[in-house]
């Protein structure tokens, strides 16, 4: 249940990766890549101050504000081989414990090595096996070939294209994808070999 993870987010593991919440000790790894502008090409902006100076991400600017624990999951992706943080993956904007969005970004030197596909499959597995969520949303700028490919390879169904819609900070044409609990269940047993051509065109 989502409520079981309000304060203690789980640690997930795949062949090559540990997926865990980040902390101050990860700042040196994040400094190597989080501030690189090429990551944000399809987000319509440059790296933010916090992304260029990741130590700021761990400082609570208003510690006097009492915040409710968020149901969202914000994880770092750690490469087991080197124990370095090389990416981030999130399930965010979770609504009514039912639906949430998927987001990810990876250190550019590790692009096209299947890292995000491996991480996202584990996250999807966690969501549908350990929480009551019914739907995951994915969105990708039509020009962002890598991101579209990741979603399709993880079994997300392409549901349409939003024309000139707002995604992060930019208006663009973007594809909208969804995975329902039923989609995941129907893939069970074969999920590690999901066919990328399965999505509807
Ligand atoms: C999108 C992103 C997370 C993908 O991460 P990744 O770890 O490189 O993804 P994967 O390696 O699992 O899969 C990418 C696939 O796209 C393919 N690909 C990438 N660019 C391509 C291109 N121009 N043409 C054809 N295929 C391409 C890769 O070859 C790979 O497929 P393959 O494994 O069959 O070879 C990464 O590019 C990134 O961090 N981008 C910046 C942030 C971003 O755009 N986030 C998504 C916002 S919606």
Image (spheres, rainbow, N blue to C red):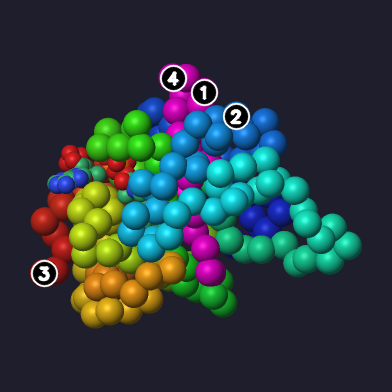
Residue 170 vs residue 103, the one in the foreground: 170
* Callout 4–callout 2 Cβ contact below 8 Å: no
Queried whether the magenta region covers residue 85, the answer comes back as yes
Label 2 to label 1, Cα distance in Å? Answer: 12 Å
* Callout 1–callout 3 Cβ contact below 8 Å: no
Per the image, label 2 sits on a secondary structure element best described as helix
Would residue 183 be seen by someone viewing this image from the given angle?
Answer: no
Front of the two marks 2 and 3? 2
17 shown above or below 164: above
Per the image, label 4 sits on a secondary structure element best described as loop
Queried whether the magenta region covers residue 149, the answer comes back as no
* Callout 1–callout 4 Cβ contact below 8 Å: yes
Q: Crowdedness of circle 4 by 10 Å Cα count: few (<14), some, many (20+)?
A: few
Question: In the drawing, does residue 118 fall left or right of residue 169?
Answer: left
Q: Position of residue 164 (x, y in %)?
A: 28, 79
- Label placed on residue 201: 3
Front of the two marks 4 and 2? 2
First along the sequence among labels 2 and 1:
2
Ligand 1: does it lie within 8 Å of the C-beta at label 1? no
Label 1 to label 4, Cα distance in Å? Answer: 6 Å
Per the image, label 3 sits on a secondary structure element best described as loop
First along the sequence among labels 1 and 3:
1
Q: Which residue is mark 2?
A: 28
- Label placed on residue 81: 4
First along the sequence among labels 4 and 3:
4
- Label placed on residue 83: 1
Q: Which residues are magenta?
A: 76-94
Q: Crowdedness of circle 2 by 10 Å Cα count: few (<14), some, many (20+)?
A: some
């Amino acid at each position: 249940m989502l409520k079981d993870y309000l304060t203690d987010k789980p640690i997930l593991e795949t062949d090559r990766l540990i997926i865990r919440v980040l902390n101050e000790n990860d700042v040196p790894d994040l400094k190597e890549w989080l501030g690189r502008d090429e990551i944000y090409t399809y987000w319509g902006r440059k790296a933010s101050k916090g992304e260029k100076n990741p130590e700021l991400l761990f400082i609570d600017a208003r510690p006097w504000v009492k915040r409710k624990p968020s149901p969202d999951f914000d994880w770092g992706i750690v490469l087991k081989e080197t124990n370095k943080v090389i990416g981030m993956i999130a399930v965010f904007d979770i609504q009514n414990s039912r639906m949430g969005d998927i987001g990810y970004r990876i250190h550019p030197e590790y692009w096209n090595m299947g890292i995000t596909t491996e991480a996202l499959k584990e996250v999807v597995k966690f969501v549908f096996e350990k929480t009551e969520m019914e739907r995951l949303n994915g969105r990708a700028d039509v020009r962002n070939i890598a991101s579209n490919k990741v979603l399709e390879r993880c079994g997300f169904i392409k549901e349409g294209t939003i024309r000139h819609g707002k995604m992060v900070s930019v208006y663009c044409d973007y594809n909208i994808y969804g995975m329902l609990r039923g989609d995941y269940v129907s893939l069970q047993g074969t999920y590690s070999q999901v066919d990328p051509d399965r999505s509807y065109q």
